[in-house]
Image: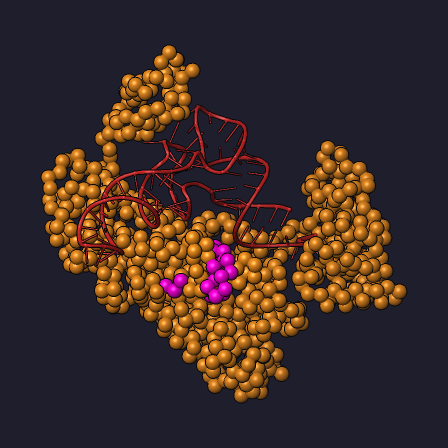
Amino acid sequence: METRYNPHAIEPRRQKQWEEAPHLAMDGRPKFYALSMFPYPSGALHMGHVRNYSITDVISRYKRMRGFNVLHPIGWDAFGLPAENAAIDRGIHPARWTEQNIAQMRDQLKRLGFAYAWEREVATCSPVYHRWTQKLFLEFWKAGLAYRKAGIVNWDPVDQTVLANEQVDAEGRSWRSGALVEKRPLEQWYLKITDYAEELLQALGTLGEWPERVRVMQENWIGKSVGAELSFPIAGEPEGIRVFTTRPDTVYGVTYLVLAPEHPLVERITTPERREAVQAFVARVRSESEIERVSEDRPKQGVPTGAVALNPFTGEAVPVWIADYVLFEYGTGAVMGVPGHDERDFVFASRYGLPIRLVVQALDGSLAEPLRAAYTEVGVLVNSGPFDGLDSPTGKLKIVEYAEQQGWGKGRVQYRLRDWLISRQRYWGCPIPMVYCPECGVVPVPDEQLPVALPGDVEFSGRGPSPLAKLEDWIRVDCPQCGAPARRETDTMDTFIDSSWYFLRFADARNGAEPFSREAVDYWLPVDQYVGGIEHAILHLLYSRFFTKVLRDRGLLGFDEPFKRLLTQGMVLSNAFVDPATKKYYPPDQVEERDGEFFARPDGTPLVCAMEKMSKSKYNGIDPLTVLSEYGADTARLFVLFKAPPEKELEWSDADVRGQYSFLGRVWRTVYEFVSGEKPDRTVSEAQERDLRREVHRAIQQVGGDIEQYKFNTAIAALMKLNNAMADYPSGQSPAYKEGVYAIVKLLAPFAPHIGAELWQALGEAGDIHTSDWPALDESALVEETITLVIQVNGKKRDDIQVPAAASEGELQEFALASEAVRRHTDGKAIKKVIVVPGRLINLVVG
RNA sequence: CCGAGCGUAGUCCAACGGCAGAGACAAAGGACUUAAAAUCCUUCCAGUGCGGGUUCGAAUCCCGCCGCUCGGACCA
């Protein structure tokens, strides 16, 4: 055994050995499926990957030592635009670019020593994978859950493709390109996720091991509102104007109706004398960007259409307006204006002089007309005909009931969630397996003709429409149904489709006959532990849940939720240097430090140093490879796990990395001194042996418990503590010391697998440490004969004494009262109460 | 504006309602060395953002405020 720790010698050796790991099989052991969100093959791992994958690797290795049959796979989310851009910019085919990147990143993953089931590796772009993506799409089609619809869609002008609603942020920017999206009318493919809105919402309640905030985000995204759809009769329209409201109890307070400017009724009901003004208003709203339109600080604007509808409850005529604050996409695209009890309506009505009516009185009766603000709380109905006197929740029910009887409307639930637009006008994606036949219409490609492969010989000449749309040879196809000349769909699928089922494919990754066998998914799924970034809280996680439920209903799966336990890891930050005036970032090699202040090297501009998320644009990324070549994989892994709890932000620190390296050096030293006999066998007392054994078993208890609870930072601290105790111990060969040496090597192995394997071998053990048993906890070793008893008087600590652990409460009180320091505070006072916390403290309450 | 989370030594982080310190980094001093690095030893540092409440006892539970982070915001 070498005297000193040298990761560069041991890591390549161990990694080579792991290449030959036996393949996984289903067996009688309990299974454990640990999964990190698979990466996009950009070409280089970043620190976020290292953090993410280190977490699942520790959990997998730990679970394996605990006797579980562990599945810990990896793959590549390999379709997507960067590959296409590389083709345009550098003339390299997307397939080849992707392949090269995967090879490079696979090598990097291996250098980090992650224990993956490599025989199950998948890449979503490969035909053996996307064939099954297409097959599953056809399952959706057969279930009536995939359909084409013409509508206004989000268009990303930079990436030249449409986007799903989830992929556009609150400011109207694309999640990928950051460009402001435009609205375009197009006919596109959708998946009917709204059919599952209620179950996706309800089942959040079963995800007890998900972070609260992810559940809340999904709940908000689904956005359930319970209310009613009411119809307001208007001349010439048999259906009337249908509005959706969550406050049917305020229907007696309606003083106007508002349509979204895009609403199809606008044109039909506008009176001739209002036509010009209405058309001008609609044109103006159309010309505005999403941002302008939804910005809240601008006044709500509208114009009357001249039309008048009837409030069926009151028989009153109410004017119909159009206004920019009503969204066409939500509800029915029309609302009833109740300025007395809706803040937006109040603002609008005040601006345009529309009447404001009180129909819900506050519970204390304090409201009087004219109202100074909208009252939106619960109250008692007034000015509401036969419903006067009802509290507003009851009023809601009764009014909906009455509307249903009269045929004026019905109770209805509305969701914010919309169907998932999956068409993308790009080349590097999974082709949608559909054919358009002039005779038969939309025809699915039959199973035996799958996969619909991407044509290889394609020219990528600048951005613009998808190259597929120009490939006449590829597009032309015989109709699978009637054989007539037909045309292929040229759009590809959103890449989130590829990732909505990859965790299922891992259960049976080499199945050539179907996406996965029922037997394999029944055994391996659901994923027991999923780990990834919070940025997928809605997109990927919601889509995957949707897929799971649909495939369950198609009989392909037998469970309801794909991910049992979820951990969202925090970001990795590092120091960035920015000029506060221009917000320009400087790379570290252009920054100079003088007396703790920072200056730009070229011109001496003072800079601010701040912890920010690692990114190329801020020049503060740390390449994992440089850490690997300097300190090795075990140090890098230990650092990202130790520095912060996994769900929190992680601040990069070179000094702390070195600290982890020295810790591994110290553990090496501990084992070396034992093996070499350099630390001699000095005589130790039984009590010393018991004390050291207690430390050893405390560490065994804590490390296991902490891993189960994701507390890797404190688990590693416990290892450090044990190593410190060993270093301080006089004997280097006693039974307890030997037990400690074995324990520390095993406990360390899941975190730092290379050094773990090496030290195990140095101890003369032949087997693989990573498949050996986790050290057994001896509860009796934890028992203490004496404890430190803290004595408080009136809650303040006054003394601490050593007492036998077995002492009774009465004895403890006697010990406490015997203390000089305590007597000073109790003498001459009556003891009113004594509180004993067993094994810890005694509190004397005197007065 | 609404919602959630977080504020503990110089820094990162610990602490079932029970001694504020497990662990680390940094700093200082020392040992080793011709010297430096590495290594080892020793030392230093907060009363838990602020104000109240509950309790025998509060970093921990409750209320209000301040600050930071994240998410959602005209969804009728």
Extreme residue in the right direction: A273
Residue A327 placement, left or right of A677: right
- Which residue is nearer to you in this view: A582 or A273? A582
Residue A98 appearing in the image: yes
Chain A colour is orange
Image color mode? by chain
Residue A616 within the segment the image draws in magenta: yes
Residue A302 within the segment the image draws in magenta: no
Residue range highlighted in magenta: A599-624
Is the residue A691 above or below the residue A536 in the image?
above
Q: The N terminus of chain A lies in which quarter of the figure? A: bottom left
Is the residue A615 above or below the residue A819 in the image?
below
- Which residue is nearer to you in this view: A526 or A598? A598
Instruction: List x then y, in percent, for residue B44.
Output: 34, 38
Instruction: List x then y, in percent, for residue A716.
Output: 31, 49
Instruction: List x then y, in percent, for residue A626.
Output: 34, 65
Chain B colour is red
Residue A248 placement, left or right of A175: right
- Which residue is nearer to you in this view: A449 or A754? A754
Instruction: List x then y, in percent, for residue A613.
Output: 47, 58
- Which residue is nearer to you in this view: A807 or A598? A598
What residue appears at the point 58 percent right and 56 percent down from the top-left corner? Answer: A221
Occupied quadrant, residue A150: bottom right
What residue appears at the point 17 percent right and 53 percent down from the top-left corner? Answer: A672
What residue appears at the point 46 percent right and 54 percent down from the top-left corner? Answer: A597
Query: In the rendered picture of this protein, how many numbered marks are placed on residues?
Result: 0
Extreme residue in the top direction: A828
What residue appears at the point 39 percent right and 50 percent down from the top-left corner? Answer: A644
Q: The C terminus of chain A lies in which quarter of the figure? A: top left
Residue A523 appearing in the image: no
